[in-house]
Image (cartoon, rainbow, N blue to C red):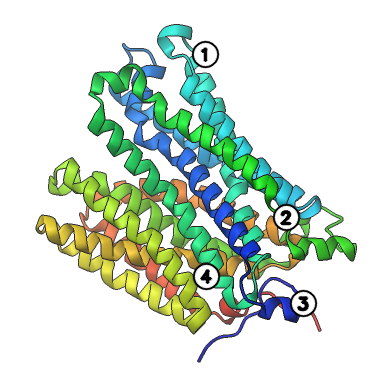
Amino acid sequence: MTTTVSAPSLPDAALRRPLTRRDLRTLGLSALGGTLEFYDFVVFVFFANVLGALFFPADMPDWLRQLQTLGIFAAGYLARPVGGIVIAHFGDILGRKRMFTLSIFLMSVPTLVIGLLPTYASIGIAAPLLLLAMRILQGAAIGGEMPGAWVFVAEHVPQRHYGMAVGTLTAGITGGILLGSLVAVALNTHYAPAEIHDWAWRIPFILGGVFGLVSVYLRRFLEETPVFQELAERKKVARELPVKTVLREHRAAIVLVALMTWVLSTAIVVVILFTPAYLQKVFEIPAKLSLQANLAATFTLTLGCAVVGWASDRFGTRAVMLVGWGGLFATTYLFYLGLPGTPESLVWSYALVGFFVGSIALLPIVGVRAFPPAVRFSGLSFAYNMAYAVFGGLTPVLISVWQKVDVMAPAHYVAGIAVLGFLIGLWPFASRGWQPRA
């Protein structure tokens, strides 16, 4: 039986209408911007070793250089909650569109600047400090972009296409990881290590910055969401600090989104980001093969997000949560227990688990509906970014320590989190969402 939930508040006729060309344009531009912005955020990790060599003293020990480079990368995650809360605050007061455009601008400019920065050999200690400053701005931007994109699209589309639209948008955002991986592979294929070290490392950052600024221009043609326009017309836009209202009146929604963020961050960090190095270190799988398998998994992740969104419209959120997270549990053990396997089995089993990682699209599908329109942006952004800062930061440390006593630690952790996602699917609030008081 299909579970019926209330989409972001719109008149009944608007909820039942078909997708229009304007809806498709909104979804397309939003997804494109999300792809480019997430690419800008993650491309750093693909060139972390090169950046470490260029932005720190040559005589610094390798372990310390790597630690400081990863510290600069992590600074982006630490800045997410602050940027997300501030951008969402004004998104609930001034409008979704303005902040939606601002977030991609705040990502594009620092990315472009990184591609143009002088290195340590040219300006000394100022080089890593400038790199750190740009990374903090990137983190603040991504903290506002993802919740903002989800809310913006969800409040534009009719109810019967709500899941498909949010899932497709999420597919576009995760496509940024795929794009970053493809660019890294292309550069390492066409340029020698010395060329990348000398100048070619700048290419992905400059391209990301330029295309991001083009996306800023294109977002000028988007319109404010009907939901916010209705709030403004009725003078029901948040008057007090929106996050204060969220903390006082919507604690169940905070818990729901935070727990689902734990599931999302674990699936992405462990399965997609952590596993390629794990394959090489633990099972001595060649780097080229592990990266090819990871590309397959990232592609099916992107596909899975879109399928999950479509299925939630067709079969209901609860059914998709149970099947999606149950499928992640099963395919996680199928993949990790089958290692190292053959090259063919590695690629197809990694791709299969990657498809079920696409169940992460359930977070925005559930999370947007968990908060009322007046504080929706702030509520989703606060819960998501705070939880991601905690769980996204602690997960690599936990896995690294656990792995010393159990080589299957990644499998057990992801499977355990999949069980949590399955149990959340049984929580009525997850599929019902926020309801106005009678």
Seen as rendered, the residue at the extreme left is 342
296, above or below 23, in the image: above
| Nearer to me, 377 or 74 | 377
Give the quadrant of the C terminus: bottom right
Residue where numbered disc 3 is placed: 11
Tell which tag, 4 or 2, sits nearer the viewer.
Answer: 2
Residue where numbered disc 2 is placed: 223
Q: Secondary structure at mark 1?
A: helix
Q: Residues within 10 Å of mark 2 (few under 14, many from 20)?
A: some
Q: Is residue 365 left or right of residue 202?
A: right
| Nearer to me, 26 or 256 | 26
| Picture residue at 40% right of the left edge, 59% below the top | 302
| Picture residue at 43% right of the left edge, 12% below the top | 120
Q: How many marks?
A: 4
Q: CA distance from mark 3 to mark 4?
A: 20 Å
| Picture residue at 34% right of the left edge, 20% below the top | 53
Which amino acid, by three-letter code, is at mark 2? Answer: Glu
Residue where numbered disc 1 is placed: 126
- Would residue 248 be visible to someone looking at this image? no
Which amino acid, by three-letter code, is at mark 3? Answer: Pro
Cβ–Cβ under 8 Å for marks 3 and 4: no
